Image (cartoon, helix red, strand yellow):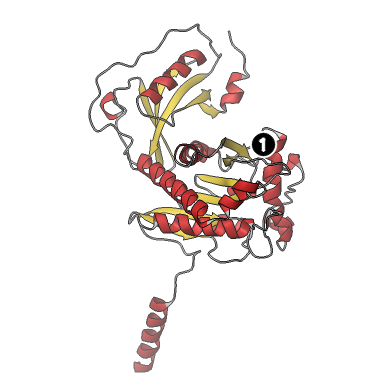
Amino acid sequence: MQTRLKVLFVLIIITLTLPLSVNAQTESNKFIVVLDAGHGGKDPGKPSKYGYTEKEIALKVVLAVGKELEKNKDIEVVYTRKTDVLIDLFQRGKIANKANADLFVSIHCNAHTSQAYGSETYVLGVHRNKTNFDVAKAENEVIFLEEDYEHNYNGFDPNSPESFIGLTLMQEQYLDQSIQLASLIQQNFTSKLKRKNRGVKQAGFIVLHQTVMPSVLVETGFITNTSEGKYLNSKKGQGELSVAIAKAIESYKKSVDQNFVATEYITEEETIIPSEEKIIPNTIFKVQIAAASKKLEPKSYNFKGLKELSRDKEGKLYKYFYGYTSDINKIQQMQKVAKQKGFKSAFIVAYRDGERISLEKALNSGTK
């Protein structure tokens, strides 16, 4: 009996002293952010004739973002890699899913044969043009370096546009939040760092497809550009980019934590400027003004005086909407009002027969 107790005691001590794996399921109530440094190990990433290495820049930026976020006691940071190793794309998603993360942020550098420059942030979606496809293709081709990639990705071929069909289905429910975070990142790059804003875009990135939470991929800049490559490779540039990304993540968290709610009641009425009706048959448009984990009454005093409010629950989040109309011109005016009230990330959503559809599909239905 004493021997068994000694063995049990030793096992308890060993268990308590073992370091936690980055893949471990977190049990904290903190806001969990998974930071993913693109490429690594035998995959250097995009080439640069100036000697800059994407995998090194991405890792340095990720570590700096993490250091900034870790100053916030309410945020927990999980890294897919902290050293120069290659992590399979599907494993990166598994790390985020197992951590039950609130956000997944993948950091990369861009490249081009010209002197193109600027920052852009991607969410998962079917590429709308050849440029977006080429960017996603370049990032996805790393799977050819992975063992048993055909099995791990169910025959996905980065070189085939047809492989992207249906790729967005798993992430569709998180698209709104992904766009919100991507917009905040781009705003910080533009307003605080005065960098060229290449926008928020959609493309079929496999690493985003593997996650089940709001996810973005940041192309911090072009390592092939003479001046921008030098900036990306510098301690100053990496520091500035990391702070901008971290602050965007914190701003997103605040919106989820309900800090988007007005601290005082604003009594002025919203002004909708009359315009010619443009009705989309069998379609309802709303303006999504917020998404958060806390349930609030859809009343004007909670949303800076806005009226005609509604609320839906999707997964962990409550989504709050302003407006209800089949008139696309009217809903565009209401979106402007929402932004004037302070809901800077407000965007239009569309429904048909009670089901959410893309705005593009709704607009292609014609008018009457």
Q: Amino acid at mark 1?
A: His
Q: Is residue 30 above or below residue 251?
A: below
Residue 169: percent from the left, percent from the top?
A: 60, 40
Q: Quadrant of the C terminus?
A: top right
Q: In the rendered view, would you say 249 is above or below 67? A: above
Foreground residue, 355 or 29? Answer: 29
At x 74%, y 57%, the residue is: 144
Above-or-below relation of 235 to 317: below
Picture coordinates of residue 134, whole percent (x, y): 71, 42
**Is residue 75 or residue 285 the one in the foreground?**
75
- The reply to whether residue 319 is in sight is no
Quadrant of residue 253 in the image?
top left
Read off the residue under disc 1.
Answer: 127
Q: Quadrant of residue 165?
A: top right
Which residue occupies 61% across, 37% down? 202
Decide: few, some or many residues near mark 1? Use Cα within 10 Å; few <14, some 14-19, many ≥20.
many
Q: Is residue 33 visible?
A: yes
